[in-house]
Each structure stands twice: as structure tokens, then as C-alpha cells.
Image (spheres, rainbow, N blue to C red):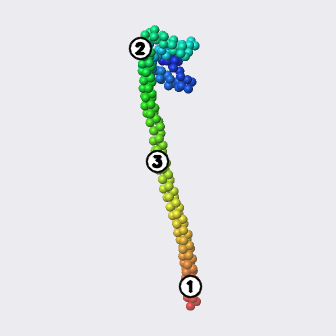
Amino acid sequence: MEEKLIQAFRPSAEADEKSLQFLCKALARKNQNGFDYLEFKLALHEMEKMEIKGELAFRSAFATASALGVDQSHLLGSLDNYLKVLEQESLDFDKALESAMLRKIQTRKEDIAKLEAKIVSFKEEIARIEQAIAEGQKRIVSFQDEIDTAEVDLQQTEKTFRTTYTQLIQLMEADRAMIKNL
């Protein structure tokens, strides 16, 4: 019956085939015994296949229903029942959709939030590292200044030492020469 309902209810080219199959399957599951709205709809579809359309198709299908003891009230009651079936399917779909959205979308939003937090943490770590690099570079400059100053000081110390040493040696050598000449 499900396939026949799909053919009878095919609303338009824009209708989603999968959704139509799902909804028609739900209608077929809830089909009531005897001739009711679903059988009426199938009869209408058969009329349309025979090129009987519009009001004439409705009257012909209703004549068939009447011959089976079905009146307008019964048809409308069963139609209302099937509308409730579709409404329940819509509610169930909404719940499933919400659940899927929570699963797929909310999970990804949480993933994004976690990644954004990691990025902030990484940026903070980079800032700390850059600060450490800047401090290290300042220390290098300071050490280099100390080295330059120490080199100048040591060169000066060496120069004064060598000058003093040379003078002492010269004095002592002069004294030696004087002592030898005694």
C-alpha cells in the first residue's frame, strides 16, 4: 500500500522523495480496516490515471465509497485521523531534528569554543615567549656592553702593567749596568 500511497500523494516536483516515503509509510502503518480516506485517495488516483479529474473524479470515488457503506462523515473523520498521524510524525521529526542539531551543531560549537580557548592560550604563551626573548636580547646587549667595558679596562690594565713592568725592567737593567761598572 505504501508505494500506491506515494503515487497517489505525490505533491509536486519539489517534494522530497525520502520524506514522502517516510510519511506515506507512517500513513500505511496507521491504515484503518475497511474503506476510509486512504482507500478514497487511492480510488481518486486511479480515476486520474484514467484521465478523470477534478470534481468528477471526487464524485466517482465517493460513489464507490458510498456503495461500500461509507459516508462523508466517515471519510472526513478518517482524514482527520490521518492528519493527526502526520502531525505526530512532524512532532517526532522536530524532536529528532533538534536532537541531531544538538549532536552535530552544538558539538561543533563546543569544539569551536575549545579551539578558540586553545588559540587564546597559545597566543598568551607566544606573548610570554616573546617577552622572554626580548628580555634575553636585553641581557645579551647588557652582557656585550660589560664585555666591551671589560676589554677596554683589561687592555688599559695590560697597557699600564706593561708600561710599569718595562720601566721596572729598564730601571733594574740600568742598576745592573751600574753595579757592573763598579
For the residue marked with disc 2, what is the amino acid?
A: Asn
Which of these two is toward me, 148 or 21?
A: 21
Whether residue 162 is situated above or below residue 84 in the rendered picture:
below
Which element carries disc 1, helix, strand or loop? helix
Chain-order first, disc 2 or disc 3: 2
**Marks 2 and 3 close (CB-CB < 8 Å):** no
Which of these two is toward me, 95 or 61?
A: 61
- Residue 158 visible in image: no
Question: How far apart in space, not on screen, are marks 2 and 3 (Cα)?
Answer: 61 Å
Pointer 1 residue: 171
Chain-order first, disc 3 or disc 1: 3
Q: Residue at x 55, y 88 (%)?
A: 179
User: How busy is the neighbourhood of tag 3: few (under 14 within 10 Å), some, or many (20 plus)?
Assistant: few
**Marks 3 and 1 close (CB-CB < 8 Å):** no
Which element carries disc 2, helix, strand or loop? loop
Residue at the extreme bottom: 182
Q: Residue at x 43, y 10 (%)?
A: 69
Which of these two is toward me, 35 or 25?
A: 35
Question: How far apart in space, not on screen, are marks 3 and 1 (Cα)?
Answer: 79 Å
Pointer 3 residue: 117
**Rendered location of residue 108, percent (x, y):** 47, 39
Pointer 2 residue: 33
- Residue 17 visible in image: yes
User: How busy is the neighbourhood of tag 1: few (under 14 within 10 Å), some, or many (20 plus)?
Assistant: few
Which of these two is toward me, 136 or 70?
A: 70
In the picture, residue 81 is in which quadrant?
A: top left
